[in-house]
Amino acid sequence: MPANEELRLIAKIVDTGELRPVIDAVITLDNFATPEGYTAFEYIWRYFHDRQTSGNVPTRELFETRHPTLEIPPTDRLTLEAVIKEFKNYYVTERLQILGDEIADYAADDPDRVLRTMLTEVSELTRIRRITRDVVLADGMKQAASDYQARKDASGMPGIPYPWEA
């Protein structure tokens, strides 16, 4: 996936200060193919889940200070929801192109493998493209595991924060 789609999402997150709609759209680190996009999203994710900055997103200035070599796109008029939609469209398109290449490479040698791969991949891509408020159990488990790990590492905080030490 070209960095521009990934970095457009990163820019929109830091410009709007909102990460919750991205989390609700089930966009995770796994959706970032470039090292720049992965590193940038991981920084925002950790900042959002850190004990001292829980629920906050770094500002564009803070982000650019922490990632001086990364050029994110300038502020634009698209909404976060529109950027999320474009990000997901592009991600699915890229995965479909990879699937097409795999079909071409293995169809004659191992058609059963191709069919299994196609079924799995198409099912996953259909789930990603679905725009719904339904909760998929597998996604909930990934989020629960991530939340557990953040709390175990003492970087995430459940409940309402309070000003004194626990």
Image (cartoon, helix red, strand yellow):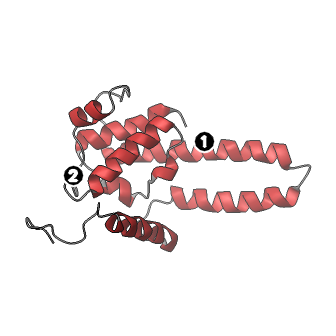
Name the residue beneath numbered marker 1: 94
The kind of secondary structure element at disc 2 is loop
Decide which of tag 1 and tag 2 comes sooner along the chain. 2
Q: Picture quarter containing residue 1?
A: top right
Residue beneath the point at 44% across and 54% down: 27
Q: Nearer the viewer, mark 1 or mark 2?
A: 2
Judge by depth and name the residue closer to the eye, 63 or 113. Answer: 63
Q: Amino acid at mark 2?
A: Asn
Residue beneath the point at 48% across and 48% down: 88
* Relative image position of residue 65 (x, y in whole percent): 26, 31
Name the residue beneath numbered marker 2: 56
* Relative image position of residue 82 (x, y in whole percent): 37, 44
Whether 164 is drawn above or below 80: the answer is below
Mark 2: give few (<14), some (14-19) or many (20+) Cα within 10 Å.
some
* Relative image position of residue 112 (x, y in whole percent): 85, 61
- Asked if one can make out residue 76 in the rendered structure from this viewpoint, the answer is no
- Asked if one can make out residue 150 in the rendered structure from this viewpoint, the answer is yes
Q: Picture quarter containing residue 24?
A: bottom left
* Relative image position of residue 96 (x, y in whole percent): 65, 46
The kind of secondary structure element at disc 1 is helix
Judge by depth and name the residue closer to the eye, 57 or 18. Answer: 57
